[in-house]
Image: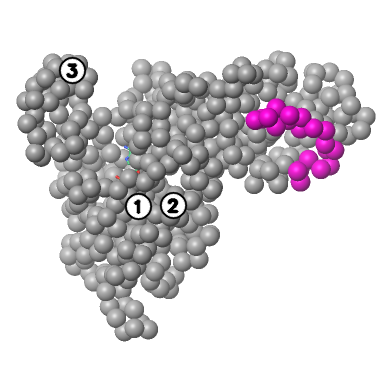
Amino acid sequence: MDKTIEKIVSLCKRRGFIFQSSEIYGGFSAVYDYGPLGVDLKNNLSQLWWKEMTQNHENIVGLDSGILMHPKIWEASGHLGAFNDPLVDCKRCKSRFRADEVVEDIDDQDWASVQCPSCGAIGSLTEPRQFNLMFKTNVGAVEETGTEAFLRPETAQGIYVNYQLVQGSMRLKVPFGIAQIGKAFRNEIIARNFIFRTREFEQMEMQYFVKPGTDDYSMIEWKNKRMKFYEDQLNINKSNLQFHEHGENELAHYAKEAWDIEYKFPFGWSEIEGVHNRTDFDLTRHSEYSRKNLSYFDQPNNDRFIPYIIETSAGLNRMLLTVLADSYWEDNENNRIVMRFHPRLAPIKAVVCPLTKKDGLPEKARMIIELLKPHFKVVFDQQGSIGKRYYRQDEAGTPYGVTVDHKSLEDDTVTLRNRDTQRQNRISIDRLVEELMKKVL
Ligand code: GAP
């Protein structure tokens, strides 16, 4: 099977998962809009992550901080000074690349002998130039007198600057975590591969505050937990997942150790989540810049320290792309495309179809919709042949199909179709809710 990103993009548009932003105006580069099925799938993913963090871990709590924050935060965090992508331009074909994607070691490079990855010319690339990725805006009534502010490029800083308020109000003891889901913005120069790298995206970050010296152990623990999340909760094929450790040249300015969880996308192995040991870098810097003491007092041991932070940083949109790519299946034998989402993730759990539009079958099917809809998302479909209706839902990834036929009127049974095997079995209507609940939750 030839699983290309173009095929996934096309299915996403056709079935209402994801649209190019501002399409009627010719599109707006590197921003995407999520359609009815996309938003439900995205919500299912973020709810799973939220539950995993804040419900399955008693010592992790949630937070929702603002996108706009005090501009000094970005000086302290180092983003104003160091949040740059070195870029190179091809003077011949005008393509632009991140320098570290063209060569491995950008510092020790003779650029005159490098080949342009696009047109193949040698010596046509410029020397790398720095570019700050933060979006600027102005806060206040008049632009000239207002304060310059930034759209946050990561959600993490909102957690760091609130850490003492959260810790104090919830009486948390180290080790504890703070989790947050929210939008982040980066003026990415090279945006490509659909929703993989965009200018507006969502992060799901958890910052785990630990005693210095226990950070290496926590790193191992969180690496394992996060990999298991993709395997067990999202059902991603294990052979498509791997770890990649950052070498010294790849480490972000704040990190002592960093690992990426990578997925084998149609365009190659790429990062979907980072697990970082940020040490006491961020809290120390915020202490300096805010002149507030951000240390933690460990009462039982009469010890005071700045906690180390282990960060797990996932991109919700990349997680979505991972699930889309992993689920896409061309069933050539049956001439259909199926999104094999785990039923827990599927945006629609079941389609209810009357076999024909007459003889009271639609009314009976509507009655079943009423029965199911308080429990999970279902749709009614009576348009076209039953085969066509099922194939539409296969592309939407709907795991179950309920068909109401003439026998249903006699004995209150329906057929229940499994999306992947296409097998059907008869089931009594009064067992339907229980049977489906077991499968989809
Ligand atoms: N707080 C740490 C941090 O932001 P990062 O590696 O720059 O680390 C973490 O980003 C995650 O956020 C990435 O693994 C990716 O899933 C997501 N991400 C980053 N930039 C993105 C972009 N331009 N578009 C979509 N997702 C992005």
The reply to whether callout 3 and callout 1 are in contact (CB within 8 Å) is no
**Whole-percent x, y for residue 421 in the image:** 68, 30
Answer yes or no: disc 2 within 8 Å of ligand 1.
no
Residue named by callout 1: 275
Q: Residue furthest front?
A: 239
> In the figure, is residue 404 to the left or right of 289?
right
> In the figure, is residue 59 to the left or right of 76?
right
Q: Residues within 10 Å of mark 3 (few under 14, many from 20)?
A: few
- Tell me if I can see residue 202 in this picture: no
Amino acid marked by disc 1: Val
> What is the quadrant of residue 40 in the picture?
top right
Which label number is shown at residue 120?
A: 3
Please determine whether, in this image, residue 222 is positioned above or below residue 176: above
The reply to whether callout 2 and callout 1 are in contact (CB within 8 Å) is yes
Residue named by callout 2: 226
Q: Secondary structure at mark 2?
A: helix
**Whole-percent x, y for residue 422 in the image:** 70, 27
Residue drawn at (81%, 43%) of the image: 431
